[in-house]
């Protein structure tokens, strides 16, 4: 309805300052509008993260710690500005998660001025508490926390670092409307950080990065409290039922997660299993080959409706029994 109501405005350019959108997002997070910068999805804002990091160490080759395995677009954004990615592995082995160490490695071959964290983590779904992540803010000149999946947690359980923005001018929090609100095609995300940084990013980028329909949809989405509460009530039990079903399937070992997906270790190679699921059951799972650290023995599944989850479990059990 919001998109339809905004159609007449297509004959005009969007407000270059996106005042209404920034006010809606600011109100949602209880922040002044100047602390909010909408973007053409979180991907566009990651580009300016890369440029920001590249300016942290002058003429030296910059580097950034990135918790790995990691979303592939982090590498794209960093490489665009010559920033080297320093992997910070969170997997003790390919079998289980290791707790994140709050102390930092002492040996640094490159000038590491920044750290990029994903919380809840993609692809593991692991959620770190804010208290675990806060020491990073005293260790790095720039800390970027990608909270693209944080909306799946109700406020009382979320571990967002947004409340610490005013205390740490070196903190950037990225948010996306793609996941929770199912709007990937509209390309809408936003950065929350100190106004001086966001004004600098605004000067770097092309004008009007967010189209008018996406802006209208975003305002409507963050105002839809009924949808938010309904999703928070639905997800935990549905995810747990899916987790239990996967755990009881021979050869599969799901990892607990806090988002709308589960990472699963498989005792057999995933690509053949993936092909069989598509061919025989018309069910699609995601392999994890794009995450170099995981290889071909991991798969990721979305938490969907009860009927769809049961269809997936039945198909997996059928194939695993062969």
Image (spheres, rainbow, N blue to C red):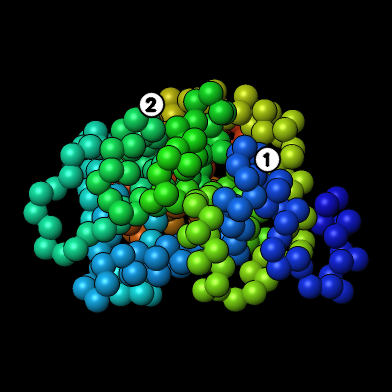
Query: Label 2 belongs to which residue?
Result: 248
- At horizontal 79% and vertical 73% (from top left) the residue drawn is 13
- Write down the residue under mark 1: 27
Farthest-out residue, left: 107
Q: Is residue 175 above or below residue 16?
A: above
Residue drawn 55% across the image and 63% down it:
199
- Viewer-side residue, 321 vs 309: 309
**Dot 2 crowding, Cα within 10 Å, few <14, some 14–19, many 20+:** some
Picture quarter containing residue 134? top left
SS class of the residue under badge 1? helix
Dot 2: what SS?
loop
Occupied quadrant, residue 272: bottom left
Is there any visible trace of residue 75 in the rendered image?
no
Question: In the rendered image of this protein, does residue 238 appear above or below residue 61?
Answer: above
The residue carrying pointer 1 sits among few (fewer than 14), some (14 to 19) or many (20 or more) residues within 10 Å by Cα, namely some
- On the picture, is 33 further left or further right than 199? right
The nearer-to-camera label among 2 and 1 is 1
Viewport quadrant of the C terminus = top left
Would you say 316 lies left or right of 26 here? Answer: left
Q: Earlier in the sequence, mark 2 or mark 1?
A: 1
* Residue that appears at 46% across and 67% down: 47
């Amino acid at each position: 309805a919001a998109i339809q109501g905004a159609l007449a405005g297509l004959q005009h350019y969007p407000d270059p300052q996106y005042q209404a959108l920034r006010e809606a997002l600011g109100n949602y997070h209880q922040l002044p509008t100047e602390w909010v910068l909408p973007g053409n999805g979180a991907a566009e804002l990651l580009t300016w993260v890369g440029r920001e990091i590249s300016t942290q160490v002058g003429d030296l080759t910059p580097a950034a710690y990135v918790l790995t395995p990691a979303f592939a677009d982090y590498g794209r954004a960093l490489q665009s500005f010559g920033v080297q990615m320093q992997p910070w592995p969170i997997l003790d082995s390919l079998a289980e998660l290791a707790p994140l160490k709050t102390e930092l490695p002492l040996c640094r071959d490159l000038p590491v001025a920044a750290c990029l964290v994903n919380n809840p983590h993609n692809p593991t779904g692991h959620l770190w508490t804010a208290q675990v992540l806060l020491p990073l803010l005293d260790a790095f000149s720039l800390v970027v926390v990608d909270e693209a999946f944080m909306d799946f947690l109700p406020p009382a359980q979320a571990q967002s670092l947004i409340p610490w923005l005013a205390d740490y001018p070196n903190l950037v929090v990225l948010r996306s409307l793609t996941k929770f609100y199912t709007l990937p095609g509209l390309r809408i995300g936003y950065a929350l950080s100190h106004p001086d940084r966001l004004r600098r990013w605004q000067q770097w980028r092309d004008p009007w990065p967010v189209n008018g329909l996406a802006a209208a949809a975003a305002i409507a989405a963050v105002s839809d409290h009924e949808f938010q509460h309904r999703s928070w009530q639905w997800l935990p039990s549905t995810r747990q039922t899916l987790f239990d079903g996967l755990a009881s399937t021979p050869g599969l070992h799901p990892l607990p997660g806090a988002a709308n997906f589960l990472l699963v270790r498989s005792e057999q190679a995933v690509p053949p299993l993936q092909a069989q699921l598509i061919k025989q059951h018309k069910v699609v799972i995601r392999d994890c080959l794009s995450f170099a650290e995981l290889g071909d023995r991991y798969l990721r599944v979305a938490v969907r409706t009860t009927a769809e989850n049961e269809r997936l479990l039945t198909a997996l059990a059928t194939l695993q029994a062969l």
